[in-house]
Image (tube, rainbow, N blue to C red):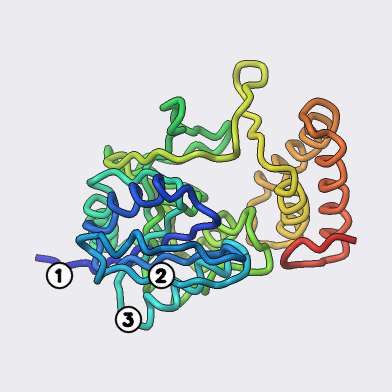
């Protein structure tokens, strides 16, 4: 019988809705041995509400006192989990709704796949839009079914993803230079470069929201509507990843097509149009000149 797979959850927050954050903390803290909450807010969030939790002793709150980006915030928690010898690190966003079977299914899934001789980088749940209950499905590279329970993927989004600690030691940490967008995809592609594989489990589903809202284009393509500043990172980081040899060619072609379409859709149709246009142009410029890290105006 396998020994217990010890899991530390790392939840990153940025000026969260306290009621929603508290609900999501309560949903996950009983499933893990430890929960590390990394606060990326410039003004630290008052977390006194945690004192009333039945699991307060399992929760550690880390205030960074500045927004270092999702990659750096994840790395803070991952390093702490590695130092404390956890077997797996569960990454979570503040607004993701973890189901009660999430850790049980993902940890047992990683152990099962490892026992089959498979080098697992990470295993995640099926992700659905928590507002519409619609499952997020890519137009291409939908994954390959390994069995009735597991689908092999190229990438997983960060939230809900259980990462093998052993895999992190070989693959490396999150790329902090990307700051936010595509940090999760880049790590998965890098994992595959080192011979690791990425899976989702059909035995767990988790509600999440990608973007502030979605618009359906031609009844098939989901146009995600983020805050305007996110266009900067999306376009800049796409250019960064186009230069990396371990990023799949199909994604590079797809990304070039999508960014080209989005340049016109966001700039001409989605308010505030001028702000979106300026962030996109700045992102393209900084991508070409290899300017990494946090957005700097000017």
Q: Which residue is mark 2?
A: 61
Name the element at disc 2. Answer: strand
Please provide percent x and percent y for residue 244: 71, 62
Q: Residue at x 27, y 37 (%)?
A: 148
| Front tag of 1 and 3 | 3
Please provide percent x and percent y for residue 233: 72, 53
Res 83 → quadrant: bottom left
Left or right: where 100 falls relative to 165? left
Q: Which residue is mark 3?
A: 84
In the rendered image of this protein, does residue 35 appear above or below residue 226? below
Q: Which residue is mark 1?
A: 3
How far, Cα to Cα, is label 3 from label 2?
16 Å
Left or right: where 266 falls relative to 86? right
Query: Crowding at label 3, few (<14), some or many (≥20) Cα neighbours within 10 Å?
Result: few
Res 85 → quadrant: bottom left
In the rendered image of this protein, does residue 99 appear above or below residue 119? above
How far, Cα to Cα, is label 1 from label 3?
17 Å
Please provide percent x and percent y for residue 102: 28, 49
Q: Residue at x 17, y 68 (%)?
A: 4
Res 163 → quadrant: bottom left
Left or right: where 216 falls relative to 36? right
């Amino acid at each position: 019988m396998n020994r217990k797979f010890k899991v530390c959850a790392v939840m990153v927050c940025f000026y969260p809705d306290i009621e929603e954050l508290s609900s999501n903390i309560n949903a996950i803290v009983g499933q893990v041995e430890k929960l590390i909450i990394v606060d990326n807010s410039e003004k630290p969030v008052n977390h006194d509400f945690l004192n009333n939790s039945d699991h307060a002793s399992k929760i550690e709150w880390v205030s960074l006192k500045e927004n270092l980006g999702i990659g750096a915030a994840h790395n803070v928690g991952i390093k702490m989990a590695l130092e404390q010898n956890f077997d797996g690190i569960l990454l979570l966003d503040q607004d993701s709704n973890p189901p009660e079977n999430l850790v049980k299914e993902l940890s047992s899934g990683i152990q099962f796949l490892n026992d089959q001789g498979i080098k697992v980088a990470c295993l995640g749940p099926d992700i659905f839009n928590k507002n519409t209950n619609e499952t997020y499905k890519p137009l291409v590279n939908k994954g390959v079914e390994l069995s009735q329970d597991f689908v092999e993927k190229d990438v997983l989004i960060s939230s809900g993803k259980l990462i093998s600690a052993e895999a992190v030691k070989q693959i490396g940490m999150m790329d902090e230079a990307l700051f936010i967008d595509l940090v999760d995809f880049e790590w998965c592609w890098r994992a595959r470069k080192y011979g690791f594989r990425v899976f989702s489990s059909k035995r767990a589903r988790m509600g999440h929201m990608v973007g502030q809202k979605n618009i359906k284009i031609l009844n098939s393509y989901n146009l995600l509507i983020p805050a305007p500043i996110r266009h900067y990172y999306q376009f800049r980081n796409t250019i960064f990843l186009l230069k990396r040899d371990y990023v799949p060619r199909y994604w590079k072609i797809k990304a070039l097509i999508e960014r080209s379409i989005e340049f016109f859709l966001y700039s001409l149709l989605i308010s505030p149009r001028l702000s979106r246009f300026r962030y996109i142009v700045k992102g393209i410029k900084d991508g070409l000149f290899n300017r990494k890290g946090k957005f700097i105006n000017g």
